[in-house]
Image: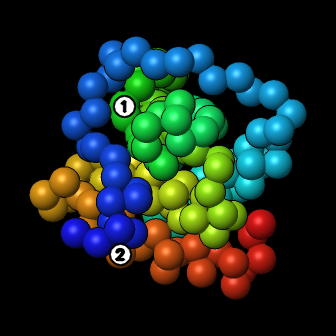
């Protein structure tokens, strides 16, 4: 496993009831939040899925990880239930890596939504993270 792969470590079988430090959503996170939300919207469209994504930003030390995602409670809607996912992204990385990390976690959301992945799902997420980041950049999404 190379360093790049390790860097985006996250676990599809992440326990949903994990205790974690509260992350303050204050002004230093504002720009990162706007960018991450644009990436999330773009990914949902690109993957043709609809899910409720709760975004949490912090530092690497808050999460002990650059990015991770796990399933949240399903929101009851009128006729259809919408799955909720919590996506946590460390903001103290370069913009390109930050965007790639959001893409990576969104690939996991797609895997859950389509119920389709191999192994830990990491191979696909690692393969797509920079490919889609470049595509996103070319399309001037950010
Ligand atoms: Zn992953």
Say whether disc 1 or disc 2 marks the residue closer to the N-terminus: 1
Mark 1 and 2 residues: CB-CB less than 8 Å, in contact?
no
Q: Residue at x 34, y 47 (%)?
A: 10
Q: In which quarter of the image is residue 3?
A: bottom left
Q: Where does residue 58 sit, x and y in percent of width and height? A: 62, 35
Q: In which quarter of the image is residue 54?
A: top right
Does ligand 1 reach within 8 Å of label 2's beta carbon?
A: no
Return the residue at label 2: 127
- Seen from the viewer's position, the closer of residues 136 and 98 is 98
Mark 1 → mark 2, Cα distance in angstroms = 22 Å
Crowding around mark 2 (Cα neighbors within 10 Å: few <14, some 14 to 19, many 20+) is few
Q: Which residue is drawn at 43% across and 37% down?
A: 64
Q: In which quarter of the image is residue 140?
A: bottom right
Q: Which residue is drawn at 44% across and 52% down?
A: 105
Instruction: Answer left or right for 138 relative to 34.
Output: left
Q: Residue at x 53, y 42 (%)?
A: 60
Return the residue at label 1: 71
Q: Where does residue 22 sit, x and y in percent of width and height? A: 59, 17
Q: Which residue lies furthest to the bottom in this view?
A: 138
Q: Is mark 1 on a helix, strand or loop?
A: strand
Q: Where does residue 142 sit, x and y in percent of width and height? A: 77, 66
Q: Which residue lies furthest to the left in this view?
A: 119
- Seen from the viewer's position, the closer of residues 1 and 49 is 1
Mark whose residue sits in front, 1 or 2: 2
């Amino acid at each position: 496993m190379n360093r790049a792969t390790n860097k985006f470590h996250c676990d599809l079988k992440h326990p949903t009831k994990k205790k974690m430090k509260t992350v303050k959503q204050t002004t230093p996170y504002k720009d990162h939040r706007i960018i991450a939300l644009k990436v999330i919207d773009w990914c949902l469209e690109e993957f043709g899925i609809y899910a409720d994504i709760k975004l949490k930003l912090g530092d690497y030390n808050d999460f002990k990880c650059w990015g991770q995602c796990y399933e949240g409670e399903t929101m009851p809607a009128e006729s259809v239930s919408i799955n909720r996912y919590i996506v946590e992204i460390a903001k103290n990385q370069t913009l390109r890596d930050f965007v790639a990390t959001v893409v990576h976690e969104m690939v996991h959301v797609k895997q859950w939504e389509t119920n389709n992945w191999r192994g830990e799902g990491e191979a696909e997420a690692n393969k797509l993270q920079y490919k889609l980041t470049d595509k996103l950049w070319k399309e001037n999404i950010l």
